[in-house]
Image: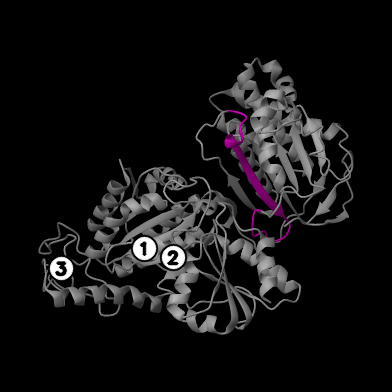
Amino acid sequence: MNETVLAPVKPRANEPHRHAVESVVVRFAGDSGDGIQLTGGRFADTTALAGNDLATFPDFPAEIRAPTGTTFGVSAFQINFGSRGIKTAGDQPDVLVALNPAALYVNLGFLPKGGLVIIDIGTFNARNLKKAGYDGDPREDGTLKPYRVIEVDVSKQTLEAVKPLGLSQKEALRCKNFWVLGFVYWLFDRDRGPTLDWAARKFAGRPDIAEANAAALNAGHAYAETAELGEDIAYSIAPAKMDPGLYRTVTGAESLAWGLVAGSSLAGLRLFFGSYPITPASSILHILAGLKDYGVGTFQAEDEIAAVCAAIGASYAGELGVTSSSGPGVALKTEAIGLAISTELPLVIVNSQRAGPSTGMPTKTEQSDLYQSVFGRNADSPLVVIASRSPSDCFETAIEAARLAVKYMTPVILLTDGYIANAAEPWAVPDMADYAPFPVEFRTDPEGFQPFHRNETTLARNWAVPGTPGLEHRIGGIEKASESGHISYDPANHQRMTDLRAAKIAGIANDIPEQTVDAGPQSGKLAVVGWGSTYGPISRAVSNMRNRGVEVSHIHLRHIWPLPRNLGTLLAGFDNVLVPEMNHGQLVTLLRSEYLLPARPLNKVTGQPFRIAELESAISALV
């Protein structure tokens, strides 16, 4: 949400008049070759070091390399940062940085009236305007009249700044994102030091490029400082009040990868990760590939089926098998997931959801794989489904996925989405001594061994590692006799095994926390129920409405299947239940079928996260 300007702070010597604000939303946009994601990432890290809370939203184009200057190739990065707790990347940007006409065309509609837009006029020629879809120049036809506008020939200024270094024009223009970064650093009183240090390390093999980026960064900062940009341009944002501790900025992919490593360590197992590259899940493979020193094995398979089968094989051999994909890839893995259910082996399947169906919109976010996760297999084949709510929460959910998989000898689907995977936020680095280990006990005693003999409490079968003397047994996807594991076509045995597998998953409800209310009363007029990445906007919307005196509660689910054992009773205490989802109502269907609950859907499938204002409007309509 955009914030009103607070009282101005007293400027330092030679400093501009800076306005103190509680939070600001900045959106960088340009061609996919302009280094927009790098620019946003550096701004986010510098902002975190300044002590602000933050949330980011990288908005990628789907095309790998769209024609330069076209709307198809526009890349954007939005960051909301401030002195208060930040829950989302912001409904609307207060500041839009547009590095070409296409970036302006695609993103201007997000900017509220009176917002600040910074444009690189060096790219505003007739050819680029036409490619962007403009009939005329928006600087001259009144399009920009409702906004505060700063026009800078960034390309010219960058070339001038790096001219002494003798770079080619192509290499020199690649530094213009650093020029823009320096300009915006001045606007928000950010320290250039960390970025200069980062550039020196990043381009250590090309010191001329490191020096050029430093020169561009400093030149952009100096330009903003001396250009007399006018009133209400420079801002000051105080550090956020956060609990003491060691913090770092993490993306959901980073947090999830580290959580998988932590979970396997708590189980006393090596981690094997079999995956096939697919947007937006590929980052997890990239991160885990660099963690071999922590007992991690990674395998980039030739296809999705090979990836999941390799992970199942690793679990059969006594490791924690993990595979990852997004919806289309999980569809290809489905038969093999059924094999893991039939053989009752632990397996973690990470689904970084994206907009579908089929290829859909690969770089846009959605929550449309809940049906697929809970029901999407042949036969009666239940498994565990859990969902992360934010980038930092991925660490906790990954550990929980590992715990449930090894304790109950079952596949577990862990749902994230494109927004969570790519977004970033501060994360309080935990002390692993605070986590209770859940070490695996393999069956080693051959006396009376039956491979499908079960633990009386968990109904999990023995985990017998191949090669253990006396524990040889048959494995496969054909139905097995309930104790011996031998092939069985007996109708009564199939009934028993189907019932046992279902009862095992249903019983997990007794081993997960009861559902709590995140905010608001335990019963009342309205509960807003969410799952996954809707947490941030729901949390802020409910908080805003409660501050206005509206009686509303927020309930957010981590455990999707089985559902928490008290959820039905909890929801029955509310007159209305509203379920916002980035799909056509999948959790609504689940809640209605389980509890005969008249839940109301609020659906959005634009590929963009919910805006806080959208949720506030829906809440107002019900109360």
> Mark 3: which secondary structure?
loop
- The Cα–Cα distance between marks 3 and 2, rounded to whole angstroms, is 28 Å
Residue 246: x %, y % from top left: 59, 56
Residue 346: x %, y % from top left: 30, 62
* Residue that appears at 52% across and 40% down: 62
- The Cα–Cα distance between marks 1 and 3, rounded to whole angstroms, is 22 Å
| In-image side of 378 versus 246 (left or right) | left
User: Is residue 202 visible in this depiction of the protein?
Assistant: yes
> Mark 2: which secondary structure?
strand
Give amino acid for label 2: Ile
Label pair 2/1, CB-CB below 8 angstroms: yes
Any mark on residue 412, and which?
A: 1
Disc 3 target residue? 480
Label pair 1/3, CB-CB below 8 angstroms: no
Residue nearest the viewer, comparing 21 with 579: 579
* Residue that appears at 59% across and 82% down: 574
Disc 2 target residue? 386
Residue nearest the viewer, comparing 565 with 53: 565
Give amino acid for label 3: Lys
* Residue that appears at 48% across and 45% down: 362
Residue 452: x %, y % from top left: 18, 70
Find the magenta span and give its range. Answer: 68-89
Picture quadrant where residue 37 is located: top right
Depicted 472 relative to depicted 494: above or below: above
Residue nearest the viewer, comparing 433 with 210: 210
Give amino acid for label 1: Val
| In-image side of 26 versus 577 (left or right) | right
For disc 1, the neighbor class at 10 Å (few under 14, some 14 to 19, many from 20) is many
For disc 2, the neighbor class at 10 Å (few under 14, some 14 to 19, many from 20) is many
